[in-house]
Image (cartoon, helix red, strand yellow):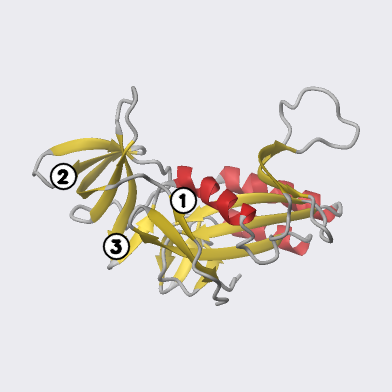
């Protein structure tokens, strides 16, 4: 693993401890607060999180307020003494901070870092409806070509290997097909897997759960897709980047 400077990102102004009782549905969980009362909170993650949504595990909540049905969000869970960030809504924000501060090797040095950019084919001037939209478009590098980048959040790990996805993701496979097509046409295309925990020592596609995603990942790589994997650890109300992980496919 390539070690880099400990770059810390503060995500939340404050967090509150709680204990998981059970997951009620895809986006809602019941938790117990320190005073013994119970409440329902938003789970900002559509993945299965099989080992994380377990009764009795410590978790951290963030108060979002406003007119939300569930004012609090469950953002991280402590599993086997390791804090795991489950807030996928924070993933792209973290990626943006890392990119703009040149913290990711091979993706550093870009002066332009734009989020949620639609890929328009040459000569296209009409509606963007139906066109591919990617998490980031990197430009203005002194020597490297512009780059289309997708970001994926990884929470699952087995036997020290980080795995993605933890549920079948047709959307994720679609992203890989599109990126592979761009790479095949000579454009720079990459996918960044951000591992939301500090214990894995390698990364792999989760072929047992979603073999099609793994197939599309390997196919896209054969067409020129670049793959980058970085892990980080949770600390207080923020995250700290630790370094890159090797990819095993």
Number of marks drawn: 3
| Distance Cα–Cα, label 3 vs label 1 | 19 Å
Horizontally, residue 44 falls left or right of residue 6, namely: left
Q: Quadrant of the C terminus?
A: bottom right
**Which of labels 3 and 1 is toward the front?**
3
Query: Are there few (<14), some (14-19), or many (20+) residues within 10 Å of tag 3?
Result: some
- Secondary structure under the numbered disc 3 in the rendered image: strand
Residue 79: mark: 3
Residue 32: mark: 2
- Secondary structure under the numbered disc 2 in the rendered image: strand
Query: Are there few (<14), some (14-19), or many (20+) residues within 10 Å of tag 1?
Result: some
| Distance Cα–Cα, label 3 vs label 2 | 17 Å
**Residue for badge 1:** 167
Name the residue located 91 percent from the left edge and 32 percent from the top edge.
Answer: 123
Name the residue located 16 percent from the left edge and 44 percent from the top edge.
Answer: 33
The relative height of residue 23 versus residue 210 in the rendered view (above or below) is above
Residue 121 appears at what percent x and percent y? 84, 37
- Secondary structure under the numbered disc 1 in the rendered image: loop
Name the residue located 59 percent from the left edge and 47 percent from the top edge.
Answer: 172
* Mark 1 or mark 2, earlier in chain: 2
Q: Nearer the viewer, residue 13 or 26?
A: 13
Residue 29 appears at what percent x and percent y? 27, 40
Q: Nearer the viewer, residue 130 or 100?
A: 100
Residue 36 found in image quarter = top left
Residue 194: mark: none
The relative height of residue 124 versus residue 221 in the rendered view (above or below) is above
Horizontally, residue 71 falls left or right of residue 226, namely: left
């Amino acid at each position: 693993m390539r070690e880099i400077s400990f770059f810390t990102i503060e995500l939340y102004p404050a967090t509150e401890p709680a204990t998981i009782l059970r997951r009620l549905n895809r986006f809602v969980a019941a938790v117990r607060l320190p005073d013994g009362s119970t409440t329902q909170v938003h789970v900002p993650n559509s993945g299965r999180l099989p080992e994380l949504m377990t009764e009795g595990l410590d978790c951290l909540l963030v108060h979002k307020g406003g007119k939300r049905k569930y004012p609090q969000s469950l953002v991280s869970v402590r599993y086997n003494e390791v804090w795991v960030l489950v807030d996928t809504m924070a993933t792209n924000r973290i990626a943006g901070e890392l990119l703009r501060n040149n913290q990711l090797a091979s993706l550093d040095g870009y002066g332009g870092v734009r989020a949620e950019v639609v890929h328009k084919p040459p000569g296209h001037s009409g509606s963007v409806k139906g066109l591919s939209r990617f998490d980031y478009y990197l430009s203005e590098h002194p020597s490297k070509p512009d780059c289309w980048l997708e970001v994926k959040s990884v929470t699952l790990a087995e036997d020290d290997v980080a795995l993605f996805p933890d549920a079948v993701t047709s959307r994720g496979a679609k992203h890989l097909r599109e990126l592979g097509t761009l790479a095949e046409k000579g454009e720079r295309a990459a996918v960044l897997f951000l591992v939301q925990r500090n214990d894995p020592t390698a990364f792999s596609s989760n072929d047992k759960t979603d073999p099609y995603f793994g197939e599309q990942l390997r196919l896209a790589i054969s067409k020129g897709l670049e793959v980058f994997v970085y892990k980080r650890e949770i600390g207080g109300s923020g995250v700290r980047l630790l370094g890159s992980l090797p990819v095993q496919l």
